[in-house]
Image: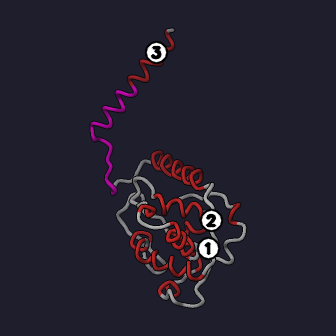
Amino acid sequence: MGFIRTLIFVIIILIIGALVFIYSGSYNVAATNPDHFIVEWILKTTKNYSVKKHSENIERPKLNDETLVKQGHEHYEDMCVGCHGAPGKDPAEGFNPSPPLLKDAAEEMSSAELFWITKNGIKMTAMPAFGLFHSDEEIWSIVAFVKTLPDLTPETYKDSEQSDQPTLEDFTEGEQDEEVGEVQ
């Protein structure tokens, strides 16, 4: 009986301590102040496993359609490049966490994971939920384009009408078995 009382007392003290800390305002939430490595690890790990779990049953359409990739390029230019950058364009600064380079994300993440993130956004990262205002087809077009980013140069990126713009033909086989990558 004494152990349970002690345990309850410790839990109450921890809750009171946490509330005092929260209401004191002493934790610096400024974007200019990097998170402690433990906080950063907790947030990244939680994000990575959440994205993996929530995207695991998403069925991916064929993404190697030239028209889909070109539509995705237009959407990317309108909605994504301002934060994430593009070949020849640096990503935005002043965010904490920094927006990931989608060239890297395209190599590390499955199409379903990219779709889920684009559709639902990520809390406390400035990544909006585009699914509130865009159809799944529009979001898939963005994913189709993002998957081509690793092979684009600044020159091929600028010319969305270029007939030899890379598609996903070489990237879509076997993707259903992809393992989750780290979301930066």
* Residue on which disc 1 sits: 63
What's the amino acid at mark 3? Answer: Thr
Q: In percent of the image, x 43 and y 60: which residue is there?
A: 129
Q: Is residue 148 above or below residue 115?
A: below
Kindly report which numbered mark, 1 or 3, lies closer to the viewer in this rendering: 1
* Residue on which disc 2 sits: 60
Helix, strand or loop at label 2? It is loop
Q: Position of residue 69 (x, y in %)?
A: 55, 79
* Disc number placed over residue 6 in the picture, else none: 3
Do the CB atoms of the residues marked 2 and 1 lie less than 8 Å apart? Answer: yes
Helix, strand or loop at label 1? It is loop
Q: From the viewer's perspective, is 138 left or right of 147?
A: left
Q: Is 133 or 19 nearer to us in this picture?
A: 133
Q: Position of residue 93 (x, y in %)?
A: 37, 67
Q: In percent of the image, x 39 and y 72: which residue is there?
A: 82
- Dot placed on the residue nearer the N-terminal end, 1 or 3: 3
What's the amino acid at mark 1? Answer: Leu
Q: In percent of the image, x 63 and y 77: which residue is there?
A: 64
What's the amino acid at mark 2? Answer: Arg
Q: Position of residue 162 (x, y in %)?
A: 54, 90
Pointer 1 local density, CA inside 10 Å: few below 14, some 14–19, many at least 20: many
- Numbered marks: total: 3
* Disc number placed over residue 87 in the picture, else none: none
Q: Is 21 or 82 nearer to us in this picture?
A: 82
Question: In whole angstroms, how far apart are the C-alphas of marks 3 and 2?
Answer: 52 Å
Magenta region, residue range: 14-32
